[in-house]
Image (cartoon, helix red, strand yellow):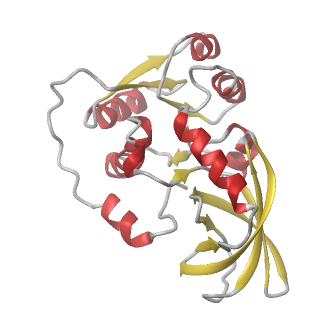
Amino acid sequence: MSFESGVFPDLMDKAFDTTLAPFPITRKAAARAALVGLSEPSRVLLAECFKQFGIEAIPISTGAAERMRKEKFEACVLALADGSDTVMEAARGSSSNSRCIIYGVGGTAQEALRYSKYGINAMFNQPLERPAALKLVRATRMLVLHEFRRYVRIPVITEVTLIGDGRRIVARSVELSSGGMSMKSSEDFTNGMNVEVSFALMTLPRVKLRASISWRQPRLLGVRFDPNDDRRRKVKAWIDSYLEN
């Protein structure tokens, strides 16, 4: 399970180029990523991946929740295990880290949804593999580095209810924008079909929106929100707030 293509898959194809040549980092790191509760091989691999994009990895083995309350981090990578919710709660409750990018390591889709109230942004598969880890860091680095003008979609994992074609299914979000969202689903729908989606995100109470299926890939769907649905403003306001903090 990992962060995957969003509402505009052609753009994400470019973000997921298969060749990622390392380049030297000589400037001071522009951001810090906390690596919490990871094995030594995982810490080394992820530290190398983040370093390529000017992000300093800070290993944390003890007192992670307290450090997330007191120190500023632009990202947090942690294994989804007992106690990880305490660290995520500390981060989201901190004025400095309430909008940091949270990466989960390992776990199933259901486990990721279990922590959805903390706004997990993306998932690293286990066992960690360098090419896949690099792709994920590269695809999300602009949010970590606060280069928001070039990034208008938010990777976030939460449960989505989708109603259409006489069916009511539960899917898992991949990316969200003010205009639509992408999600993982075991069921397929026809392009252009009108549907209703509902979901909740951290500080955003559950919202229901009219939408239509805009694209399909194996086990992936993209929906475009109805521009005439005023409830879409709530999503835009949440995204604006997320990017401003």
Question: Residue visible at 58% across and 17% down?
Answer: 68
- Considering the image in quadrants, where does the N terminus appear? bottom right
Q: Is residue 159 above or below residue 127?
A: below
Question: Residue visible at 59% across and 59% down?
Answer: 178
In terms of depth relative to the viewer, which is nearer, 136 or 209? Answer: 209
In terms of depth relative to the viewer, which is nearer, 188 or 1? Answer: 188
Q: Is residue 8 above or below residue 121?
A: below
Q: Is residue 228 above or below residue 49?
A: below
Instruction: Say if residue 16 shows up in the picture.
Output: no
In terms of depth relative to the viewer, which is nearer, 105 or 140? Answer: 140
Q: In screen coordinates, is 156 left or right of 20?
A: right
Task: Give coordinates of residue 62: x percent, y percent.
Answer: 57, 11
Q: In screen coordinates, is 167 left or right of 73?
A: right
Instruction: Say if residue 112 shows up in the picture.
Output: yes
Task: Give coordinates of residue 51: x percent, y percent.
Answer: 28, 31
**Residue 245 picture quarter:** top right
Q: In screen coordinates, is 20 left or right of 4?
A: left
Task: Give coordinates of residue 7: x percent, y percent.
Answer: 52, 68
In terms of depth relative to the viewer, which is nearer, 108 or 167? Answer: 167
Question: Residue visible at 42% across and 32% down?
Answer: 42
**Residue 130 picture quarter:** top left
